[in-house]
Image (cartoon, rainbow, N blue to C red):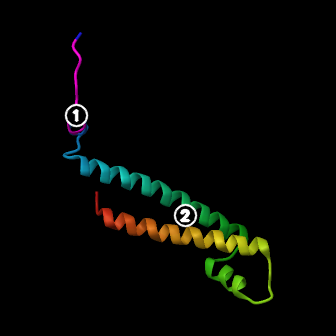
């Protein structure tokens, strides 16, 4: 029985990737696109639940003397998703086209 020893480069080349950087770039894109999809879906659910946009929740959050902990928490969560989506889009741009 013959034992074959492969290098990472050989395995990746056999899978159709010209070099490890291309494989890593495509894997990173897939991970980021998955996160983007999940975050956009979560953001849409929050907007639907509260029947308002991020800017409307922000305006409510910033009103002095108007405390609604559930709405405030929703705003903070929605803002987190908006920031994360912006970051992911910037990271996808940095990776370039596949």
Local secondary structure at mark 1:
loop
Name the side, left or right, on which 17 lies relative to 46.
left
Question: Is 92 left, or right, of 37 in this rendering?
Answer: left
Quadrant in the picture for residue 66: bottom right
Q: CA distance from mark 2 to mark 1?
A: 38 Å
Q: Residue at 65% across / 82% down in the picture?
A: 58
Magenta-tinted stretch: 2-10
Residue 73 coordinates in the image, percent (x, y): 71, 71
x then y, percent, for residue 25: 31, 54
The image quadrant that residue 75 belongs to is: bottom right
Residue 93, compared with residue 27, is above or below; it is below
Q: Residue at x 61, y 66 (%)?
A: 44
Q: Position of residue 72 (x, y in %)?
A: 72, 75
Q: Name the element at disc 2.
A: helix
Choose mark 2 or mark 1, whichever is in front. Answer: 1
Give the residue displayed 68% in from the left and 79% down from the top: 57
Examine the rendered structure and indicate whether residue 59 appears above or below residue 76: below
Q: How many marks?
A: 2
Picture quarter with the C terminus: bottom left
Residue linked to disc 1: 7
Q: Is residue 59 magenta?
A: no
50 horizontally vs 84: left or right: right
Give me the disc on residue 40.
2
User: Is residue 9 rendered to the left or right of residue 40?
Assistant: left
């Amino acid at each position: 029985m013959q034992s074959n020893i492969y290098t990472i480069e050989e395995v990746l080349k056999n899978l159709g990737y010209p070099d490890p950087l291309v494989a890593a770039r495509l894997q990173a894109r897939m991970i980021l696109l998955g996160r983007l999809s999940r975050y956009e879906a979560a953001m849409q659910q929050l907007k639907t639940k509260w029947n308002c946009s991020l800017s409307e929740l922000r305006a409510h959050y910033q009103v002095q003397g108007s405390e609604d902990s559930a709405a405030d928490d929703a705003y903070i969560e929605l803002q987190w998703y908006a920031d994360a989506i912006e970051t992911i889009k910037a990271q996808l741009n940095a990776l370039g086209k596949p």
